Amino acid sequence: MSSGPFDINLVVARLQELDPQPFSQIGTIVEYSKVTDLSGFAMPGAYVLMGTERGIQGKGARAQNADAVIGIAISVRNYGMGAEGLTHEVNPLIGQVRDHLIGWRPTPASATGMQWLRGDVLDFDGGMLLWMDTFQVQHVIGGRRCLK
């Protein structure tokens, strides 16, 4: 068992399994951080972002459960139909991501399956929309003895 943070690359790999693949790009904070305005996002794109991680208080065991929060930012564009067109574009993508992640156990050390927490519009400019779904998973960290 590792004491490292939750590996978001597991979520990237899970989203890459979608068939047919609806996204032109599935990235992480690396790609997300390079975008300076909405027009810079891949369309449609998905970006897996690590959120907070916190320990769940236990009884002093060597292994510990931790909650990891993961965000999936989804970018879409539709110039023809205004806000209605954007929801027409983004809603099926949101549904696919949720269907593929809710209940999924990323590793055998995952204490729970992935749980959906909330969805929010992050940004909107008339022809482009950035949506964020937030998920949480409990995973086990620690478990190794310190060797001296």
Image (cartoon, rainbow, N blue to C red):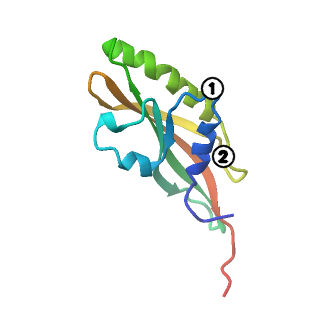
Residue 68 in view here: yes
Local SS, label 1 = loop
Residue 66 placement: quadrant: bottom right
Name the mark nearer the viewer: 2 or 1.
1
Residue at 43% in and 52% down: 30
Judge by depth and name the residue closer to the eye, 9 or 80: 80
Horizontal side, residue 131 vs residue 54: left or right: left
Q: According to the image, label 1 marks what residue?
A: 20
Residue 102 in view here: no
Residue 144 placement: quadrant: bottom right
What is the distance, in whole Å, between disc 2 and disc 1 at their CAs? 21 Å
Badge count: 2
Q: Three-letter amino acid code at disc 2? A: Pro
State if disc 1 and disc 2 touch (CB < 8 Å): no
Q: According to the image, label 2 marks what residue?
A: 106
**Label whose residue precedes the other's in the sequence (2 or 1):** 1
Horizontal side, residue 25 vs residue 41: left or right: right
Q: Position of residue 133 (x, y in %)?
A: 46, 34
Q: Position of residue 96 (x, y in %)?
A: 57, 26
Q: Mark 1 Cα within 10 Å, few/some/many (few <14, many 20+)? A: few
Q: Position of residue 112 (x, y in %)?
A: 65, 44
Q: Three-letter amino acid code at disc 1? A: Pro
Residue at 53% in and 50% down: 68
Q: Is residue 21 above or below residue 80?
A: below
Q: Position of residue 70 (x, y in %)?
A: 50, 45
Judge by depth and name the residue closer to the eye, 147 or 56: 147
Q: Is residue 68 above or below residue 57?
A: above
Q: Mark 2 Cα within 10 Å, few/some/many (few <14, many 20+)? A: many
